[in-house]
Amino acid sequence: MKLLYIVTVVVSLVCVSAASSDTPPSFLFAWGTQGGGSGQFDWPISMAVNASGDVYVTEWNNNRVQKFTSNGAFILSWGSGFRNPRDVALDGSGNVYVDDQNNNRIQKFTANGTFLLAWGDLGSGNGQFNAPTGIAVDADGNVYVADYFNHRIQKFTSSGAFILKWGTQGSGDGQLNLPAGVAVDASGYVYVAEQENRRISKFTNTGTFVAKWGTSGTGDGQFSNILDMAIDANGDLYVTDPQNYRVQKFTSNGTFLTKWGEAGTGNGQFNQPAGIAVAPNGWIYVADQYNNRVQVFGDAATATTHTTWGRLKSLYR
């Protein structure tokens, strides 16, 4: 028997900015339980938020994308043909781009999941991929893909035409080692999260190296691993540090600002924080992968009652 429950929590329902630059944001609310039903998750791994505040979540094991309102109400889902969709990004028209990782391709959809086109296959040539892992779209509609095992970034038009690439395997300036995430700021700078180098590298939109920061560790500005990044309206960068069970925040030049999170299942705790996105109102959405939920953080100074729906898992088969 499936049972419904209602959880009432206090969150802000007005447009608010993120918490001050040196203060961790407050936990607002969360949604999701493990499963394959609407609004349930099996390894939510990445997310994106559109201009209206709708939230897209990719699921590694359910091989689908789910779309929600900003408050976690289910809207729709799609996923025929995916093999472990990894990352998701949106363009200015609301189109949805998905790293279909184990098919070694990018798929493009409308905002409601209608298929538009796909490109890519397995290989190391221009336009080919070996586990595309991160994806981002700039203000001009160009698409950047973190080509994980090829240790490079590839740049495409919105229709999948190859433009350029950069990166070779290594730890030197401008080199990459297992790039897992990519993000683009309003000025066109490209940030790459490197899993093996435990760092963020910053480039121009043509691949010229600008800066880097991060080393392996548990201290401020250090990483145990890196999965995803997001950029807020001020240009500050949020980075998921999954094996340190936290999110770290930096300026665009790599100055550490704040962090939050620890291992666990409680509010504000994580079990592999994977994907991250920042909404137009400043709310920060984190895909809490092994807890099979999305957590939302922000400024709770102005609050009202919010109701989140979910499912109780049956104790009996």
Image (spheres, helix red, strand yellow):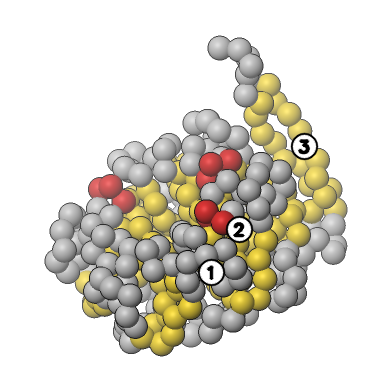
Image coordinates of residue 44 in percent, x first then y, are 50, 45
Q: Which residue has dot 1 on it?
A: 222
State the residue at coordinates (19%, 61%).
Answer: 128
Q: Nearer the viewer, mark 1 or mark 3?
A: 1
Residue 26's disc is none
- What's the residue type where badge 2 is placed? Arg
Image coordinates of residue 288 in percent, x first then y, are 57, 48
State the residue at coordinates (41%, 87%).
Answer: 210
User: In the image shown, does 173 or 99 lie closer to the viewer?
Assistant: 173
| Quadrant containing the C terminus in the rendered view | top right
User: In the image shown, does 104 or 49 lie closer to the viewer?
Assistant: 104
Badge 2 marks a residue whose secondary structure is strand
- What's the residue type where badge 1 is placed? Gln
Image coordinates of residue 289 in percent, x first then y, are 53, 45
Q: Which callout, 3 or 2, points at the residue further toward the start of the chain?
A: 3
Q: Which residue has dot 2 on it?
A: 246
Q: Which callout, 1 or 3, points at the residue further toward the start of the chain?
A: 3
Badge 1 marks a residue whose secondary structure is loop
Q: Is residue 145 above or below residue 110?
A: below
Answer few, some or many: residues within 10 Å of disc 2's Cα (few below 14, many 20 plus, some between 14 and 19).
many
Q: CA distance from mark 1 to mark 3?
A: 36 Å
Q: CA distance from mark 1 to mark 2?
A: 11 Å
Q: Is residue 141 visible?
A: yes
User: In the image shown, does 302 or 201 lie closer to the viewer?
Assistant: 201
